[in-house]
Image: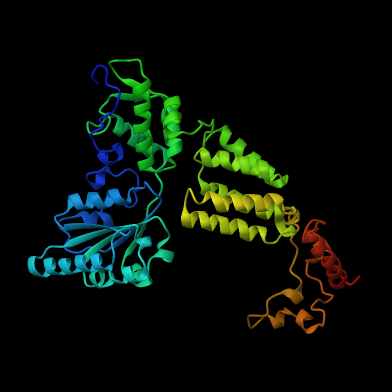
Amino acid sequence: MADGESTLDANTAPLAVRMRPRNLDEIAGQAALLKAGSPLRNLASTASKSATSVILWGPPGTGKTSIAHAIASSTDCRFVELSAVTAGVKDVRAVMEKAQADRDLYGVRTVLFLDEIHRFTKAQQDALLPGVENGWVTLIAATTENPSFSVVTPLLSRSLLLRLEPLNDEEVGNLLGKALEAPHGLAGRFSLSEEALSALILFSSGDARRALTSLEASAAVALNTSKKKTGIVQVTAEHVSVAVDRALLRYDRNGDEHYDVISAFIKSIRGSDPDAAIHYLARMLEAGEDPRFIARRLIISAAEDVGLADSSALGIATAAADAVQLIGMPEGRIPLAEATIYLATAPKSNAAYNAINAAMADVQGGKSGVVPAHLKSTAYPAAKKLGNGKGYIYPHDDALGVVAQQYLPDSLGEKSYYEPTEHGYERDIRARLEKIRRITRGH
């Protein structure tokens, strides 16, 4: 770094572009998709005369575009790139016509990379079908949305769907290390403190592009505030915080803070405090917590803490988890917030939770007993000879739909596991169950 230099190389491309992999071996993460003999390796092989079209589905920054460019640099095929944001049916048809001519006249394969295919209308996607079906092009399509909902079935059935996963912490850390040292990266001019590295990994949320962009911005802040005129400039956690304009939260996804905040989140929902619950949700999301982990905890809370006091709660929590999986972040924060507030303000009951725990404790303690003969299966030839089903009363034949009949084994008698509360819908269940038990138990 020259004396007095206060900016990064302004005339170069962004760090994320400079660090773009030149071949599949340089791709960060996605080891399962890039192993020897995989479809992507086959697609990149110059020895392969035919290859299956692929749809790359994954969150931003997982390598979809990088994989396409790496394949382009590894093969002697003609490579064409279109964006669904700007390309129309006319552009697609022009590519198909040229690809067919190149194949038939010159024996040259065409690989078409189509970014954000979910933005294509049905008509635009249909225009791809002849080329894919007849082998005029090998399609590499990228999408952040579930292709089952955003790609037409004929195209989906003619392509191999490959799911890309967010980078793990180690993979992001390795990528940042390479960017610090690479001649085409930051060329050894900067170092990262342990806290800065942890912050960059946390803020990236498995997104390689975000990690590199944040590193470059943090390095610029460090350079502009450094009093050093020569030597290596250290990037600190404070530089990262300024660069990404976010508070550095004391939150370790593998440490105590992870468990403390999720515990406070669930206990706030259980305690019917939506404001505290939303606060802890925001802390987790801002700190880079996996939204799928939060969604799973909401499902558990709906079943354990709300239960049958509000039978809609479990469906809403499950729908929020599905929504997060479908749309990703940052929009996924909205259904998570909706589910959080719904659960926090819903009536609460852990009666179903207590019921299954009590029943399992009895089973584990040997209190199982023999299934009453009239409840046993009659679905095999010797069943009736054994007395199975004898005396069984079919409840639907009764006007009330409920009859006096023993269901528990003899050893358990009239044991009651489920005891509804007076909260929410369980108040109605409790009143009805009292009447049902009086009939079924004959008193």
Q: Is residue 297 left or right of residue 71?
A: right
Q: Quadrant of residue 110?
A: bottom left
What's the image's color scheme? rainbow
Q: Is residue 35 visible?
A: no
Q: Relative to 209, is 247 above or below?
A: above
Q: Relative to 342, is 100 above or below?
A: below
Q: Residue at x 30, y 61 (%)?
A: 54
Quadrant occupied by the C terminus = bottom right
Question: Residue 190 in the image: x percent, y percent?
Answer: 32, 24
* Figure label count: 0
Q: Relative to 164, is 263 above or below?
A: above
Q: Is residue 409 left or right of residue 294?
A: right
Q: Which of the two residues, 41 or 95, is positioned nearer the viewer here?
A: 95
Quadrant occupied by the N terminus = top left
Question: Residue 46 in the image: x percent, y percent?
Answer: 15, 56
Question: Residue 256 in the image: x percent, y percent?
Answer: 58, 33
Q: Is residue 258 left or right of residue 72?
A: right
Question: Residue 207 in the image: x percent, y percent?
Answer: 39, 43
Q: Residue at x 84, y 68 (%)?
A: 437
Q: Residue at x 82, y 77 (%)?
A: 403
> In the displayed image of the protein, which residue is found farthest to the right?
443
Q: Which of the two residues, 45 or 423, is positioned nearer the viewer here?
A: 423
Q: Is residue 368 visible?
A: yes
Q: Quadrant of residue 131?
A: bottom left
> In the displayed image of the protein, which residue is found farthest to the left?
106
